[in-house]
Amino acid sequence: MRMGALRSLLILPLIAWAAVGCVPLSETTVFYTPASDRVYPPKGKRDPVPVLSEPPAWPHQVIGRFALQSDRGYPFVSKALLYNARLQGADAVVVRKVGFDVRQTVNQIPASWESIPQSNVMYQRVQNTQGQWETVPQVYTTYVPVFRPERTVVSEKQWSDVTAEMVVRRGKVPLAAPGTALTVMPR
């Protein structure tokens, strides 16, 4: 394998990671629906939150539901799921549905006229200050009309879909009941 190809293979995942990292996860909090009025203390950024395909064996209660459809890719959906779980203080996430599908977008672009500038050179004979004749180039611009016919642009994007429940261990103490002075809003 050539060194350039190897370098490309190493750089490509970094670019993809950077592109996903640019989207703020705080935008995904609207996809969380609480199941009760209890608020639990948020977890730290690095605290582990297990993602399960079945409810945990330990006694638990569901504190909310997270449902998101996105065209930003599965890594983003996964990060959003964990971000919301930590924000809500969940001890685990039970994934109920994961799906992928490809959706087409069809855009009709109407016919139009466009003017494209084109630079030209014209040579003109002029008399200089000494009275001699010389050929001098002069640049001028004309605009050429171009007709763009109507066209249809079809693009495809993969969408990721996840539905999950946030659960806490039964008996976990909430921060406080909403409406009291002790209510702390997670950041």
Image (cartoon, helix red, strand yellow):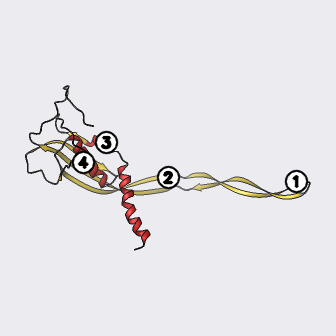
Tag 4's secondary structure?
loop
Q: CA distance from mark 3 to mark 1?
A: 71 Å
Name the residue rendered at 23%, 54% in the picture: 98
Name the residue rendered at 29%, 51% in the picture: 77
Count of numbered circles in the view = 4
Q: CA distance from mark 4 to mark 2?
A: 47 Å
Mark 3 surroundings within 10 Å by alpha-carbon count, few (fewer than 14), some (14 through 19), many (20 or more): few
Q: CA distance from mark 2 to mark 1?
A: 53 Å
Tell me residue 6's x, y (percent): 39, 68
Of badges 2 and 1, nearer the viewer stands 1
Q: Amino acid at mark 3?
A: Ser
Q: Quadrant of the N terminus?
A: bottom left
Q: Which residue is mark 2?
A: 109
Query: Residue pushed farthest top?
Result: 181
Q: Quadrant of the C terminus?
A: top left
Q: Which residue is mark 3?
A: 26
Mark 2 surroundings within 10 Å by alpha-carbon count, few (fewer than 14), some (14 through 19), many (20 or more): few
Q: Which residue is mark 4?
A: 46
Tell me residue 40's x, y (percent): 18, 37
Q: Which residue is mark 1?
A: 128
Lower sequence index among marks 4 and 2: 4
- 144 left or right of 132? left
Q: Amino acid at mark 4?
A: Arg
Of badges 4 and 3, nearer the viewer stands 4
Lower sequence index among marks 2 and 3: 3
